[in-house]
Amino acid sequence: MPSPGSSPNTVSRTVAVIGGGPAGLMAAEILSQAGCDVHLFDTMPSLGRKFLLAGRGGLNLTHSEPASRFAERYRMPEEHTKRWLTEFGARELRDWAAELGIETFIGSSGRVFPVGMKTSPLLRAWLKRLVASGVQFCLRHRWQGWNQVGELVFDTPHGIRTFRPDATILSLGGGSWPRLGSDGAWVPLLTDRGIAVRPLQPANCGFEVAWSSHIREVFAGQPVKSVVASVTLADGSTIERPGEFIVSRHGVEGSLIYALSAPLRELVVATGEAMLRLDLAPAHTLAGLTAALSRPRGRDTLANHLRRYAGIKGVKAALLRENCDPATLVDPAQLAKRIKDFPLRLTTTRPIDEAISSAGGVRFDAVEDHLMFRQLPGVFCAGEMLDWEAPTGGYLLTACFASGRVAARGVLAYLTDAGTR
């Protein structure tokens, strides 16, 4: 560790990386391979905890779609996305995994998974390589900011520890899943230094719906399959997605809801609610559905009529019954319209600590192209703590890896420049 009295012209190339998620680990790898003395600090007793959680149902590492389409998935300034992913995109990520002995495959949806589907073999191989390259792991170290002489301060089980590196990368995650270390505690530490930070908000999250007790108690946990959801934005344009979602006790969640969570969240913030419109029978046209439902029912129940001619049953049928007045339920034309355009009122997002990821964070005008803070020379930022947002499907992980590499390259350029001054 360089001493506080070291000559300012001496560059020992000691780097602190704070945060042991994908971005921080990737930054540590690049720096150690370049010969830096890397110390990686993390609050938790083990590394990559949220990364492990992401792979609990099968690690979706990245996506195989064309690079131009891939970059369009991100809600952030386009120039940042393209620069990160040009250096390290989906193809490079798969090659990197292969170097660790982890082969990948493309699933039917275009998503990319490791053979075996699990995160733990990849993480174990990665950590082994980092140890071999000299990275020192400092666990149970909660970052507390800087002291008056510019040293990093950590709260540890053995008391306060200080550390003075030549450069620092902050990769502390967003505000989702605080029990795994991403608790947003870094926000006041940076805002106190004058760094512009957008408030952290839930992303890839569920929403609350004022369900009846019947829906909540009977159908919570059940999927609503084969629907098309749409949301109309403030400018009058509409976003439409096919898929499925899950009815929860509190509202709705699942892949289709997550795909639309950003515009839905913005509507909730702006107006206090968001209207999600569902086509419950996308395989039918309105005219065809109206004709089918107009067939004589005879002694058939409405439930059987809906199941036979519209494919509506279970939770879909329950939603219709609660949303339609008696006159609509017996009018084939009006019932068909409601099936094709079913309104679902979302009242608010679920809490950020339930979200898959978070939006908001360090504004991009607070950092330079290589992610160094303009007001804190030698201090860089990477990963989810930056103000960007991505859907599930491997996009979030890919950009975390890529941003860690960008920050590490920035550190190397900064140290080289410092050594020539």
Image: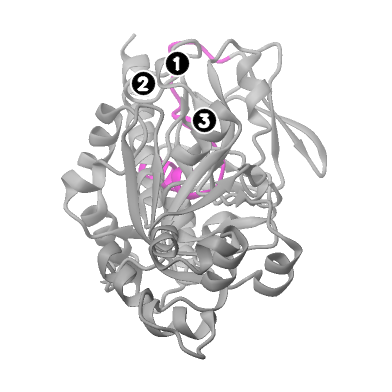
**At 58% across and 45% down in the image, what residue appears?**
346
Identify the amino acid type marked 3.
Gly
Q: Is residue 117 visible?
A: yes
Specify the quadrant of the image occupied by residue 191: top right
Q: From mark 1 to mark 3, how far is it between C-alphas?
A: 13 Å
Depth check, front residue: 317 or 224: 317
Identify the amino acid type marked 1.
Ala
Q: Give the residue at mark 1.
A: 366
Say whether residue 404 is left or right of residue 56: left
Q: Quadrant of the C terminus?
A: top left
Circles 1 and 2: CB distance less than 8 Å? no
Depth check, front residue: 25 or 350: 350
Q: Give the residue at mark 3.
A: 360
The chosen color scheme is one colour
Q: Position of residue 216 (x, y in %)?
A: 71, 65
Closer to viewer: mark 2 or mark 3? 3
Identify the amino acid type marked 2.
Tyr
Determine whether 98 is above or below 261 in the image: below
Q: Give the residue at mark 2.
A: 414
Q: From mark 2 to mark 3, how far is it between C-alphas?
A: 27 Å
